Image (tube, rainbow, N blue to C red):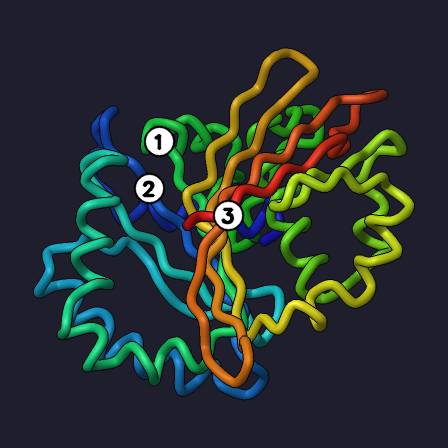
């Protein structure tokens, strides 16, 4: 999701919400859909997802096709707190109504998705950065620096997108020369070996879907930690396996640009 796209979401949110309280959080979910499925996906959202969200009293603020490509779609929801979001979504996605209802039709059209969770107050703070409503898209003032948290969130999404697309050229731009990866089995992989394996890593993994959620960014001067949870399905010996892992990526701001210096993966058993 591009920065101006995220700000466009924020504008829609500001126009939709009369008031936002400090404890609220906003969840922006960005889907990459399988080619040629977006129209059907959109209809499923309208006919199945939204009525179910209403029944479960989950408030949604916006949804629909994105502007940048024909396989992208977004859904914006809000919750009273981070804790209530987790409890609400666990109940929703764990329910028989979802599992025996629209789940298969919806999930089968999703290639992958990313989730960003923001404090609601930050949405209001961005209002000053939006252009007047003159028919043009929202943009950031050239002299106004992009917040590090937004830059890092964008890099986190790029990281996963590069993995799924096995894009070594784009990925190399965000990986520091001193990068190492600590695998889930404890193996420490240096940059050269890591980038060599990147070209086939997703294909060899057997993943049939891969997404991230629960992003958490902590910044300590020129160092930042990004923690996210992966949600995936994969084929293993002819069986479909559902799983999760937690990863923590360490970024360092070098010459004004954030670069990933370490990635550590922890499986969820």
SS for callout 2: strand
Mark 3 → mark 2, Cα distance in angstroms: 27 Å
Residue depth check, mark 3 versus mark 2: number of the one nearer the observer: 3
Q: Looking at the image, which residue is at 47% across and 40% down?
A: 215
Residue 19: give x, y in percent of width and height: 20, 34
Mark 1 → mark 3, Cα distance in angstroms: 28 Å
SS for callout 3: strand
User: Which residue in the structure is indicated by mark 3?
Assistant: 267
Q: Looking at the image, which residue is at 22% across and 54% down?
A: 90
Q: Is residue 98 left or right of residue 245?
A: left
User: Which residue in the structure is indicated by mark 2?
Assistant: 26
* Most distant residue in the top direction: 221
Above-or-below relation of 85 to 163: above
Q: Of marks 2 and 1, which one's residue comes earlier in the chain? A: 2
Q: Is residue 2 left or right of residue 266?
A: right
Q: Camera-side residue: 145 or 204?
A: 204
Q: Of marks 1 and 3, which one's residue comes earlier in the chain? A: 1
Residue 266: give x, y in percent of width and height: 54, 42
Q: Looking at the image, which residue is at 58% across and 70% down?
A: 207
SS for callout 1: strand
């Amino acid at each position: 999701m591009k920065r101006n796209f995220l700000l466009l979401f924020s504008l829609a949110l500001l126009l939709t919400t009369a008031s936002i309280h400090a404890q609220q959080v906003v969840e922006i979910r960005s889907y990459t859909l399988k080619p040629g499925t977006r129209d059907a996906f959109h209809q499923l959202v309208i006919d199945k997802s939204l009525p179910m969200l209403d029944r479960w009293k989950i408030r949604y603020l916006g949804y629909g096709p994105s502007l940048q490509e024909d396989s992208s779609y977004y859904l914006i929801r809000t919750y009273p707190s981070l804790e209530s979001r987790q409890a609400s979504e666990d109940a929703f996605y764990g329910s028989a109504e979802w599992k025996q209802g629209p789940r298969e039709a919806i999930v089968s059209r999703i290639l992958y998705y990313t989730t960003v969770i923001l404090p609601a107050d930050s949405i209001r703070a961005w209002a000053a950065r939006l252009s007047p409503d003159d028919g043009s898209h929202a943009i950031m003032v050239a002299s106004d620096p992009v917040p590090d948290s937004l830059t890092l969130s964008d890099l986190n999404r790029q990281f996963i997108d590069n993995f799924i697309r096995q894009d070594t050229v784009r990925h190399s731009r965000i990986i520091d020369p001193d990068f190492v990866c600590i695998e889930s089995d404890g193996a420490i992989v240096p940059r050269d070996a890591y980038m060599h394996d990147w070209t086939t890593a997703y294909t060899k993994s057997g993943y049939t879907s891969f997404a991230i959620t629960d992003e958490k960014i902590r910044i300590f001067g020129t160092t930042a930690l990004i923690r996210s949870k992966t949600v995936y399905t994969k084929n293993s010996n002819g069986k479909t396996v559902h799983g999760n892992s937690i990863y923590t990526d360490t970024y360092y701001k070098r010459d004004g640009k954030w670069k990933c210096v370490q990635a550590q993966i922890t499986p969820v058993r």
